[in-house]
Amino acid sequence: MADDQQATRISRRNFIKIMGVAGAALASRRLLNGRPVRADRPAAATAELPPPPAKTEADVLLRMQEELARALKKPPAERRWVMVIDLRKCVGCHACTIACVAENKLPPSVVYRPVIEKEIGTYPNVSRLFVPRPCMQCEKPPCTPVCPVNATYTNEEGVVVVDYEQCIGCRACITACPYGARTSDFGYTYTEDTPVADGLIVGREKADDYERASNFEYGKGYDRPRSHGSPIGNARKCHFCLHRLHEGLLPACVTTCIGRATLFGDANDPDSLVAEMISKPNVMVLKEELGTKPRVYYLV
Amino acid sequence: MKTEATLKRVIYVLGAAALLFGLWGFYLRFFVGERMVNYGSYVVWGLWVAMYLFYGGISTGSMMIASLDYLFGIRLFKGIGKTALWAAVVTMPAALVTIGMDLGHMERVWKVFLQPNLLSVMAQLVWGYSIFMVVLLAALWLIIRLERGKQDARPWLRFVMAVGLFLSIFLSGGVGALLGVNASREAWHTAMLPAQFPVFSLLSGCALMLVLLGWFAPADEKRNSQLRALSIGLLILLLIKTYYLWVDYSQALYAGTPVATEAVEQVLFGRWGWAFWLLQLGLGMVFPIAFLLYKRFQQNPLWSGVVGVAVLVGIAVARANIIFPMLSIPELEGLATAFTGPHLTFDYYPSLMEWSVTLGVTGGAALAWLLGMDYLPFLKTQSKEVAQ
């Protein structure tokens, strides 16, 4: 018992000595090189953690950006723009819808890419599914042959476009679209008819200016007129942001997708991400039975 | 005679009132634009398209009736050709004005003539209507020449009427095809529509002639015979229309798949269900059929006109029931709530401006017909001709 007490005393004394030396050493080290002091990790815990990845996988956006640059070097007719939407990754944030509205300065009543929300099952076994729905850019589009003045057609890159100056606004193309992917511009703005009392809405006038500014669809500057004139009165639709593509930029909805659920590229490039994705067995298109051959694919 | 004068006065007053009300709608359409309409990007076509089908059907149907006189030379119908032709002349512009109001850029209509896509049914119809109007005016001009004793006009008149009859069938069927080519619209995509629409046009023309003869033609034995013949014709056409309705709806409902039944259920039990049961079926079909089955009513001028109006109201509602309910079905489930905003709804009811334009066009057409019959010299001879 006496030996034990002696051992304890020695031990306590030794401990105080060690702590004193160690403290002085650490303090001097900090003073000397200014580095933070960090406690050593227990050896056992470090051994259980997985090793850090040797190389971080690049963001798919960077890959698609490179592929886009590659595709733009080819003649337009050799490109086949395709969009792939991975429904397992879509979180229903609607960022793509908003990005599209901002990019194309879409007024109220016009939408190119709504996100359809579906509720599956009944309480308590309920799940939700989000289906972004851009224009399907069909290879066999039912909307183009009905146009009485050839105002809507498939361009050489395979994108279904609308010539705003040619369109007479009959809306036959909207009726013919099986996906509800076209909307008519009835001439609204978001800021018009809002209260005008000073200070009530900050920046109202600037916002109005923004809405009137050109939207650059189809590579042209379409100022929004205050009365009548295109694109007011026209059928409007998603065009895969052709004006961005030609500048080497991905469509606005693709770059904005927080879950990287929307992929875009040239399916004629066998090394492209979209070519890889549309060859997967879990790929599908909307209303396949109609035979319109959409260029928008969904991964399920 | 007294009844005729009273009816004429009533229609003059109602027509003028409707036209005045319509001017307000035209003003709004031209100076405010399409913001005051209730159709949109989902219910793409509304009241104006339905009324375009209606007036177009009356015009082409009237041409068919006129051909009984001027092309086929049926003695019984001698004298009604001009009345029918004039009705066709005033109702075709009514159809074109109504559909013109529906265009987002009506100032670009010239492009359909100079830069057309002739594979488009709509472009074919625009060209067809234009030729049809020329044919109608040519026929009227030839009739005037004939009445002035220029017998060389007769073969030309027969030729022009033959072209007119062909066009009236082509244009009626074409309207059916305009809807029918939309493969994704289950209730429209049937070859039956282009086959049915010429029958509906003839029915419209027949009903209008009952009104015009019954209310405005001089009372004589010949008119009674013509009324009876037209009544029997109308009865047969109504029975055919009933059969069409039955096969269309029963087949869709029997199939039971949602895509087939949805449109029919919209018509029968949807927002516009009352219009189907009361106006299209009750007023437009059951009442006239029951009425026309009695011979003594078939020669009653006043009631013939009433039956004609009832049938026309029924046809107008039927045209609307072809358009709205089908477009009220979302192309994709959930689309209605995916993005909201003005004109992004599947629930349609015409706005006051749409009604205003429709009534204005109707009033204008009625006034034009009456004014022509009362004041245009070559149409005023109608009374004598019928009396002969």
Image (cartoon, rainbow, N blue to C red):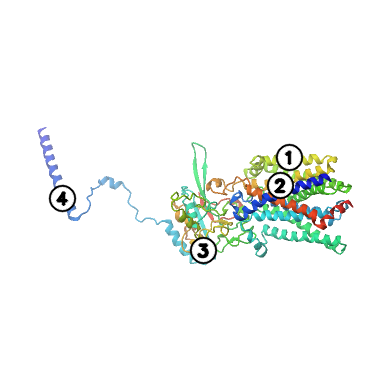
Q: Residue A276 at what x, y percent from top left?
A: 48, 57
Q: Are marks 3 and 1 on the same chain?
A: no
Q: Quadrant of residue B82?
A: bottom right
**Does the residue at mark 4 contact the one at mark 2 (Cβ under 8 Å)?**
no
Q: Let me know if marks 2 and 3 both belong to one chain.
A: no
Q: Amino acid at mark 1?
A: Gly
Please tell me whether mark 4 or mark 1 is closer to you in this view: 1
Residue identified by numbered label 1: B282
Mark pair 3, 1: CA separation: 56 Å
Q: Residue at x 46, y 47 (%)?
A: A91
Which residue corresponds to mark 2? Answer: B316
The residue located at (11%, 39%) in the rendering is A10
B46 or A152, which is in the foreground? B46
Q: Amino acid at mark 2?
A: Ala
Could you say which is closer to the camera, residue B6 or residue B67? B6
Say if mark 3 contacts mark 1, CB within 8 Å.
no
Q: Nearer the viewer, mark 4 or mark 2?
A: 2
Q: Which disc is residue A219 wearing?
A: 3
Q: Are marks 4 and 1 on the same chain?
A: no
Q: Residues within 10 Å of mark 2 (few under 14, many from 20)?
A: many
- Badge 4 is on which residue? A25
Q: Chain of mark 4?
A: A
Label located before the other in sequence (4 or 3)? 4
Kindly state the secondary structure of the residue where label 1 is placed. helix
Q: Residue furthest top?
A: A1
